[in-house]
Image (cartoon, rainbow, N blue to C red):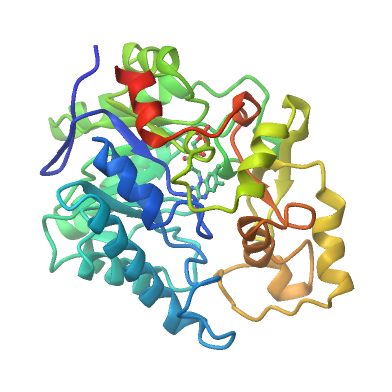
């Protein structure tokens, strides 16, 4: 059943996108190795400059695009002919600058979630070969994006990622009270979006399932249910190539199913994470009187009123290995990780 995945003018040997994982969990090394193995590797934009040579504590908005481009170049050094793309969250204050930086550095695919990327075709107008891929959790969201892009730019998405709020890691595009109710049907959404493009525009748009996909059986199930490919993030954390500190990876290996839950992010969205240190995350900000230094998000309750915690520094601490006060995002399947492996071994298991 496994077939290549065509997104715009690019064809990946295997129908797998490695999901973007912000704040340097998926930077150039992980993305490059996934692309080298025949998948689509994504460098995530959010907080990429932190813990990099480009950031001096004061120049966040200058350092972010520079660090982003450096990581995209690093990925291409690993996989010169690979499909290297990026993940840029619409909620980021410098969304536009990061999209422009990515296409200038040669990113072939741009995946955008955490908001509706209504202006994405305009930002990439000088790079028509770049494939544009919104993340949507509902048919309605995909329709809104498609209608706007078609009317304003005569363009449709090159693929759509359907992220399941009941299983995916990181920020989720659904109200917290609607998550885990059993109402959401990931594959009905996948088929609904495919049908919408077929009926409304007469085109086949690849639709990619994200959330809760861990092993070969999960991939086969997703394809059998009508998805053209899968996006997997948590599965790639416990690899030698993942850009996070070993303590971050070890936290996945040590966690139990019941440690994984939902936390309200200051971005106003729920996020899925390992929550055995939930109290310490905010306490760290209170103890250290952490100010909003970066202004990284367009809307943030920590920036506006000191509510919740500073998300980018909490994720940054975890990425560097402080998993006692840092925030470790993960999908519902992270407890299944039992060892550190390699990206190639994961591909062998999924498709060998
Ligand atoms: C550590 C981590 C960080 C993430 N960061 C981002 C991000 O920056 N932007 C984004 O759109 N999605 C982000 N996600 C979501 C993933 O890209 C992916 O869609 C989702 O986790 C898929 O579910 P899975 O982890 O069960 O495979 C993140 C997920 C994890 C686990």
Residue 22 to residue 263: above or below: below
- The residue at 47%/54% (across/down) is 115
Image location of residue 23, percent across then percent down: 53, 60
Image height check: is 283 above or below 205?
below
Give the percent coordinates (x, y) of residue 61. 46, 81
Q: 343 or 302, which is in the foreground?
A: 343
Residue that extends furthest to the bottom in the rendered view of this protein: 58
Which residue lies at the image location 33% right of the left edge and 44% below the top edge? 33
Count of numbered badges drawn on the protein: 0
Q: Quadrant of residue 2?
A: top left
Residue at x 28% of width, y 71% of height: 100
Residue drawn at point x = 29 percent, y = 60 percent: 120
Decide if residue 237 is on the left or right side of residue 149.
right
**Residue 168 spot, x, y in % from top left:** 55, 35
Name the image quarter holding the C terminus: top left
Q: Position of residue 326 (x, y in %)?
A: 72, 56
Location of residue 292 (image quadrant): bottom right
Res 187 visible: yes
* Residue 191 shows in the view: no
Quarter containing the N terminus = top left
**Above or below 222: residue 26:** below
Q: Is residue 42 left or right of residue 182?
A: left
Q: Quadrant of residue 196?
A: top left
Lateral position of residue 280 relative to residue 174, left or right: right
């Amino acid at each position: 059943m496994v077939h290549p995945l065509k997104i715009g003018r690019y064809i990946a040997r295997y129908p797998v996108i490695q999901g973007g994982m912000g704040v340097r969990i998926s930077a150039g090394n992980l993305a490059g190795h996934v692309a080298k193995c025949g998948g689509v590797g994504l460098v995530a934009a959010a907080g990429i400059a932190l813990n990099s040579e480009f950031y001096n504590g004061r120049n966040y908005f200058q350092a972010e695009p520079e660090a982003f481009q450096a990581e995209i170049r690093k990925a291409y050094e690993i996989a010169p002919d690979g499909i290297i793309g990026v993940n840029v969250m619409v909620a980021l204050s410098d969304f536009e600058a990061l999209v422009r930086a990515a296409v200038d550095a040669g990113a072939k695919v741009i995946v955008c979630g955490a908001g509706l990327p209504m202006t994405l075709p305009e930002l990439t107008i000088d790079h028509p070969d770049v494939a544009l891929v919104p993340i949507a959790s509902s048919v309605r969201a995909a329709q809104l994006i498609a209608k706007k892009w078609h009317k304003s730019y005569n363009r449709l998405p090159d693929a759509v990622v359907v992220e399941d709020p009941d299983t995916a890691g990181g920020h989720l595009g659904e109200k917290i009270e609607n998550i885990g109710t059993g109402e959401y049907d990931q594959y009905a959404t996948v088929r609904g979006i495919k049908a919408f493009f077929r009926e409304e525009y007469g085109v086949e748009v690849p639709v990619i399932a994200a959330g809760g996909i861990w092993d070969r059986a999960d991939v086969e199930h997703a394809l059998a249910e009508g998805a053209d490919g899968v996006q997997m993030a948590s599965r790639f954390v416990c690899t030698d190539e993942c850009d996070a500190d070993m303590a971050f990876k070890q936290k996945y290996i040590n966690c139990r199913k019941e440690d994984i839950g939902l936390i309200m992010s200051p971005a106003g969205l729920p996020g899925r994470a390992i929550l055995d240190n939930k109290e310490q995350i905010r306490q760290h900000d209170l103890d250290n009187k952490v100010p909003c230094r970066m202004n990284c998000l367009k809307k943030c309750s920590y920036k506006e009123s000191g509510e919740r915690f500073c998300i980018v520094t909490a994720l940054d601490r975890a990425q560097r290995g402080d998993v006692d006060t840092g925030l470790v995002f993960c999908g519902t399947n992270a407890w299944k990780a039992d060892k550190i492996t390699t990206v190639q071994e994961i591909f062998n298991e999924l498709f060998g």
